[in-house]
Image (tube, coloured by chain):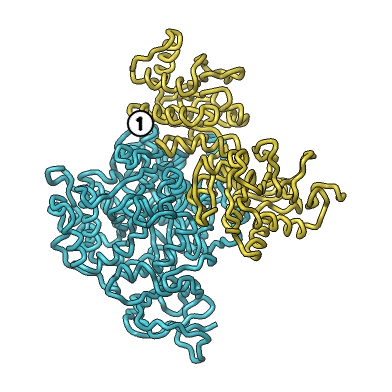
Amino acid sequence: MTADSDDMARIDGQAVALPEAMARAVEILTSARQPLIVGIATDVAGARAALALGAVSGAVVDHVGSEATMSLVLPLQAVGGFVVTPGETRARADSVLVIGHSALQIMPDMAQALALAAPPPVAMEPGARRVLHINPGAMPLAGAELAEFTGLSPLALVSLLSARAQGHRVNALQATLTEGDRVAAWLAAAHYGVIIFNPQELGALAVEALFRLVALLNRTTRFTTLPLVPSASAETFKMVCLWTTGFPGRVSFVRGAPAYDPELFDAKRMVAHGEADVVLGIDGFGEGLGLPDHALAQIMLAPCLNGKARRPEVFIPIGQPGRDHAGVLFDAATGTLKAMPAAAATSRPSAAAMLETLRALALRKGGAPC
Amino acid sequence: MLTRLQGGRVIDPTRGLDERGDVYFEDGRIVAAPSHIPDVTLDAAGCIVMAGALDIHSHIAGANVSTARLLLPEAHRAHKARPATTWLGDIGFSAAETGRLYAEMGFTFVVEPAISPQQALHAHLELADVPIIDKGLLAVLGNDDVCLSLIRDGAGRAALADVVSATLAQSRALGIKVINAGAAAAFKYNLRGFSLDDVVPHYGVSSRAILEALQQAVMDAGVHHPLHVHANNLGLAGNVETAKATIAAARGLPMHLAHVQFYAYGREGARGFSSAAAELAATINAHPHVSVDVGQVMFQPTVTISSDIMRQFNGLGEARPRKGIILEGEGNGGGVVPLIYARDNFFSALQWAAGLELFLGITNPAQVFFTTDHPNGAPFTAYPMLLALLMSADLRDEWCASLPAEALALTHLPAMRREYSLNELAIMTRVAPSKLFGLSDRGHLGAGARADIAVYSDQSDRAAMFGKAKLVIKDGVIVVRDGKARADYFGRTLALAATPDATMVRRLEAHSQALYGINYASFDVPAFALPQSHGFEDIACRS
C-alpha cells in the first residue's frame, strides 16, 4: 500500500490517519447549517447508520437513486397498486406485457431469470407464455410479439389502453386505435398477466394510470405488475428508511423527528438551490452522487476516489458490501433483502462502521447544531 | 446485583398469588427471597406488580408492515408533528417507536404473526431494530406450491413435518401460521371466494385438507404453539358457521384461531349482519383444545395488513383513504388496505361489541388471548382502554350510550355484566401466552423466571394505569420509569431450534430452482446479516 493509494483516508488530498480524517469530518458536519447526506449506495447496515447520523446531525437524507424509487412510491401513495415477485411471475404468468425500452435493459439478468420463453409451470391452463413488448425501441425482447405506438407519451399510451379496455371512444389516429385494440384484446385474454416496466421511464403519472388499469383488469381477470428499479442500494435504502423512520426516503431530521417530503428533500434540488452547505456522500458501489457538476461533497465515503479531478475535503475509504465485507442488500431476483457474504474479504471498513463512528463523535461534540 | 421490588401488590396467577409482597431479582432472573441484603430496593408501594405482558399476534414487522408505512405517509407524519388525536395519528410506527410504546405499557414480548418464509430476513432486520421487548415471528405456509403439491400427492405426514422444520429453521420462526388456507393460491386462479371445503384449482386440494395436514405437521415437528389459523371468510356476514366448522375441523387436537372477532357474524337484522359472538363463545367454551385471540375493533382510523390477499382484494372498495396495495409472492403475499372504524357506523359498532362479547363470553381466560390484531382491529396503543373496558361494565355502558342502537340490538353486550379481575387479566396476558409458546420462564414471577416485570400505579382509571407503567424491568434492567422508556436496551428474538432434514432441504432447493429459478439459500437468515444488538434465543422443540 502506498501513501497515494485509495486505502488511505485523506484531508484535502493528503493522506492522513483515519482518526484525523474522522475528526475533521465531524467538525465539518457539526458546524453545518444544513447538512445533506446523499448517495447512500450501501447495504442495510450502512443505510441504518446513515439515517442514525442524519438524526444526530439534523441532516436531510436522500438516496442517489430516489428519483427512480419515487417514480414507483408516489403512485403507490396516491392510488395504491398491484405488485408481484419475479419468482411468481416466472412460475405463473401466462401473459407478460413489457412496456418500454428500458425495463429489461436496466436489468440484463432479469429476462433470463424470468425464463419468459418457457411455459409457466403452475399456470391455470398449460401452454406457452404470451409475451408482448410495447415500444421496445432498439432492443425488442426475443420471441415477443411487438406493438408500437409512436408519438404517444407513456401517460397517453396507458390512458389509451385503459380507455380501449373499457370500450371507451378515443380521439386518435386509426393506426393507433387499431394497435390499442389489439393490445386491449391481448390483455383481456390473459388469465394471470404481469406488466413489467421501469417506473422512471414511464414517469409517476403514467405508473399511477397503469395501477388504475391493473385494478380495472382485476375486476374480471387476474393482473399485476413487476416494476423494475435498477439500483439495489436504492431499494435497500427505501426499505430501511421505512422501518426506521416510517418513510420511504427523502427525509429530513431538521426538526428532530423525521419528516418526509419527496420534493422538498430532493438532494439534487436542494444543492441546485443552495439549500445545503455541507454534503456527505456515501458511494459504496461507484454509483456517483447524482448531484449537479458544480456540487462537491465535502465528506466522501467510497472505495476509491476514481481519480476525480476535484477531491472532497475529507475522503474516508470504505469497502464494497458483498465484496470487501458481508452485508444485506435488496436482491432483484427475489424481490427482497438477501444476505451476502464477503466475496473477496478485505480489511476495508464498512460504511456502517465509519458512519457509526462519525455519529458517536458527533454525539460527543454535542449533537445537532440546532 | 440483587434488587428488591418492595411492597407492591403482586399478582402472579401461576403461583396463585395476589398479595402485598416483595419480588427479588438478580442477574436478569427472579430469585426466591434471599438471606442477604439487597443491593438496590425499588419502591412498589401502591403499585400492582405483574410479569411482563406477552402479545401473541401483532403485525409489527416485515414486508407487509413496511408496505403499510409506504402507503400511508400521512399517518406517520401526523403522529410525529401533530397531536396524537389527529386522523390516522398513531399507526405508522417505526420499529423504534413500536418497542418503546409496547414497553411503556408493560409488554416485554410480542409475536409478529405473519411472515412469508421468503421475507424472513427482512422481518428479522426490522425486529432487530425494535428496542426493549423480546420478539418472535410465525412463518406462513399453506398457500405455497411446496405444501399444496405435497398434500395433493399424498406425500404423507413425515414429509410435511420436514417442510415445517426446514421452514422454522430457515426463517428462524417460533411457529407456523396458515392464512385462509388455499385462498391466496386460489385467488391467483381468479377465484374470489373460498370456504373450508373449496378446492384450490390446479392442485385439487381443499382448504380443510391443508388445515388438517399442517395442524398435524406442526405437532409432528415439535412446535409448542399449535397451528395458528387465520380461517376462511374473514369479515363476511354469516361467517360464524365457518368459525364453527374450523373448530370442528380441529378434530379435538390443539389449534389456535386468530382474531375470531372477525368471524363472529350472523345474518340477522335489516342489514343481514349481526353479532354471533355468543354462539361462537359457546362453541369455544365447549372445545378447550382450541385457543383463540380476539382481534378487538376500536373506533379510529387504521390500516389493515393481511396476507389474506383474497380478502384484502375484496376489501379494496372499503378502503379509506381510497387506496390499497396487493402484493403477490411465492406463497401468500400481502394486502394493505386502510380503514376507518367509526363510532357512528353500524358495522364498526357491531364489530366492537362482538369482540367484547367474546372476551366476556369465553369463560376461561387462558383460552382467549388479548389482541386487536394490531393494526387490523386497532393499533396496539388502544390496549389500555380495551383493558379498562374489560374491567368495567359501567365504562362499557358509557361507550354503548354513544353507539348506534340498531347495532347494539343485534348483540348481547349491553346485558353482559362480567368484569375481568386483575388476576384474570394476568392469566390472559401473561400466563396463557407463555404456555402457548412453551416459554416456561416467562409470564410468571416465580424463582428462575426471566426478570421481566411490569409495575403499574394502582389507580381507578385503569386505562391510565395500563397506558404508562410506573416501572418496567426487562431482564433485570429498568427500561421504563414513570411511563417513559429508555431507547438503548435491546431484547432478543426467540426462535425454535428446529433441525431441518437434509434430504428435505435438498428437495426444497431443487424445487426453488425449478419453479422460481432462485436459490433456496437466498432466503436464509445468517447471523452475520443481523446487527450486533440482535441476539437470537433458541427455544427447544417439544420432545
Instruction: Give the x, y percent position of residue B112.
Output: 43, 55
**Does residue A170 lie above or below A2 as drawn?**
above
Q: In this view, does A284 lie to the left or right of B127?
A: right
Q: Which amino acid does label 1 sit on?
A: Asn
User: Are there few (<14), some (14-19), or many (20+) residues within 10 Å of tag 1?
Assistant: many
Instruction: Give chain B's shade.
Output: cyan
Instruction: Give the total number of marks visible in the rendering.
Output: 1
Residue shown at 59%/53% (left/top)? A54
Quarter holding residue B462: bottom left
Question: In the current view of this chain or complex, which residue is farthest to the right?
Answer: A2
Is B19 or A38 nearer to us in this picture?
A: A38
Q: Is residue B290 visible?
A: yes
Which chain hosts label 1? B
The relative height of residue B45 versus residue A20 in the rendered view (above or below) is below
Is B87 situated left or right of A236 in this image? left
Q: Quadrant of residue A209?
A: top left
Q: Chain A is drawn in which colour?
A: yellow
Is residue A122 something one can see in this rendering?
Answer: no
Residue B392 drawn above or below residue A315: below
Image-based side of A257 in relation to B405, left or right: right
Looking at the rendering, in which quadrant would you find the N terminus of chain B? bottom right
Q: Where is residue B3 in the image (x, y as percent from the top left)?
A: 49, 83
Circle 1 SS class: loop
Which residue is labeled 1 in the image? B190
Where in the figure is residue B425, as x and y percent of width and height? 30, 69
Identify which residue, A185 or B208, lies in the foreground. A185
Q: Residue at x 22, y 60 (%)?
A: B286
Residue placed furthest toward the top = A174
- Indicate the position of residue B90 as horizontal and vertical percent values: 38, 54
